[in-house]
Amino acid sequence: MSDGGSETAAPLPPRPAGRARVRVTAPHTGGPAAQPAGRGARPGTSDVQGVYVRSLIRSQLRLALVVAAGFVIATGLFVVAIALVPDLDRTFVVGVPVSWLLLGFGLYPLVITVGVLYVRAAARNEARYRALAEDDS
Amino acid sequence: MNPAIGYVSIAAVALVSALIGFYGLRVSRTTSDFYVASRTVRPWWNASAIGGEYLSAASFLGIAGLILLTGASALWFPIGYTAGYLMLLLFVAAPLRRSGAYTIPDFTEARLESRWARRVTSLLVIVVGWFYIVPQLQGAALTVRITTGLPAWAGSVAVAVIVAVVVAAGGMRAITFVQAFQFWLKLTALALPVVVLLLAVGGGTAAAPALDAALAPAVAFPTAAGPADLDVYRTVSLMVALLFGTLGLPHVLVRFYTNPDGVAARRTTVIVLVLLSVFYLFPTAFGLLGRVFAPDLAAPGSADALILLLPDRLVPGPLGDLLTALVIAGAFGAFLSTSSGLVVSLAGVISQDLLGGRVRGFRIAAIVSTAVPLAVALVTESTGLAGSVGLVFAFTASTLCPMLILGIWWRGLTARGAIAGMLTGAVLSAAAILAGAPLGAAVPALRPFLEQPAAWTVPLAVVVTVFVSRADRRGIPRGVDGYLTRLHVPERR
């Protein structure tokens, strides 16, 4: 868990200059450009490493699907709740019905919260992978 | 309205954008500087630049106009535009950064090992980009016509020329600075007027004729146009288009290559979510104000001008002039930034595929990428900025999005499957969009399905992609395991 906890909050310090610049050139053939290679990207990757990578991909996909489904369900429930309470249309705050205010402004905190939770969890998955892969090599 | 205000603020924004662009020129020297700003852009800069590029005419003028025109159903547009970045964060941000590719076609070719898949992707990227630039130029035409009294085409031509010159001269490094500046300009240009107008209305100091003409709350916000009166199919379909269209937009994706690594790409995306959430408070507030104080503008041609006209109505005099100048500047910033972002990514694709990837080719491609949408914008007329941008999202969601998501997460995707799926999505959604008006008039029952096609075209494109890939098991690229490893394994630290 070298960096796992720090990438969640919105205001972040600029990253250290040391590893930022990567020299790349435009690919003529369209092949992948040079990049800081992942550990397993080299040819001759062992089978065990392959298992770790596949499990990392599976856990990241599962995480993304769960988070996306959670967001969609929460949004759906929010809207159904607004629709089911007709009084919200008749209650006015600063001259605007509460139902309009809720739909217009209420979902953004949810989007941000879900995003922050996802980034944390995704970093945890990567830290777990790194611990396994490093132990093994 | 005093035309001088229009001239001054449009000229000022154009000048500042060009100056920042040429400042950037001095630091962009190599080919890689041109394409991806050497990948040294910091997350906050990058996030501001993404926001600056993403918030287009549809966001700046279109949302408030649509809230005025149709009511609470328009509130779904900003929600979808923001949540689209959530989907981008979940499914593509980090892997795409790690792919090491410059453009979507680069990614397609590297992942699928197929020149044909690359060609189809390039073609789609160019189509998406061109049709996304068109509403920006139409927004410029509207703004210039309303604020200066000049003929509408002058606005489209001015934006096209500035964008072509800045992009061809400076490349993307320059554009990153310009875009970041544009985000804060656009935010200020909406936030300040909203605050002043709310204070004026709340304190009763607004212009008496405007206050007298204001609608009663129950009339301005009828239940029939409220959130509870939801057209379920249209809303769901719109959300599918916006949520999944965002992650296929060419100018959005190219920004992620400028992050130093995958973790920074995620971090940048979360900052983008925050910036967008803050930004969209203001067009929404403008739209709500418009329903009360400017119901006469609620017609398809004029609603998009709400943000430009409202400040002067509510606080006439010098303060109103100042606010008007500010919103005009912000609107022009929106047209310039989104168009130049699109032109950068289109020029990258065109120059690499057709012109050999040199800086000179990039410059020629930048001019071509601006000229074609300009021609389209000059011969067509806008019926609503938010709506036409929504259709571009539907097309993107049906074509590039299934290929990207399956390419990143599913080992079994093959070049044939991807091509079949992209063509299916392209043909179906383009047919629905083009045939929507005539066919919908003949068969009213089909109208919602043609006007909001994403809910059926996206799933069909995915199904075709998966089935053709399954039938083509021998077509699975040899290097797929290595490439997926590269996409998902965290960078060496």
Image (cartoon, coloured by chain):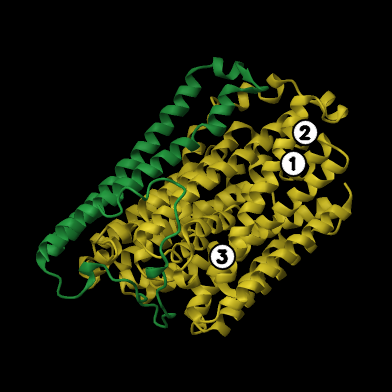
Q: How many marks?
A: 3
Which residue has dot 3 on it? B176
- Residue at 47% of width from left, 19% of height from top? A84
First in sequence: mark 3 vs mark 1: 3
> Does B77 appear above or below B116?
above
Q: Which element is circle 2 on?
A: loop
The colour chain A appears in is: green
Which residue has dot 1 on it? B306
First in sequence: mark 2 vs mark 1: 2
Disc marking residue B206: none
Distance from Cα at disc 3 to Cα at disc 2: 37 Å
Say whether residue A123 is left or right of residue B44.
Answer: left
Q: Chain of mark 3?
A: B
Disc marking residue B294: 2
First in sequence: mark 3 vs mark 2: 3
Q: Percent from the top left, x then y, of residue B64?
A: 66, 40
Q: Chain of mark 2?
A: B
Q: Percent from the top left, x then y, of residue B486?
A: 27, 66
Distance from Cα at disc 3 to Cα at disc 1: 30 Å
Confirm whether residue B133 shows in the render: no
Confirm whether residue B95 shows in the render: yes
Tell me whether marks 3 and 1 sit on the same chain.
yes
Q: Chain of mark 1?
A: B
Say whether residue B346 is left or right of residue B121.
Answer: right
The colour chain B appears in is: yellow
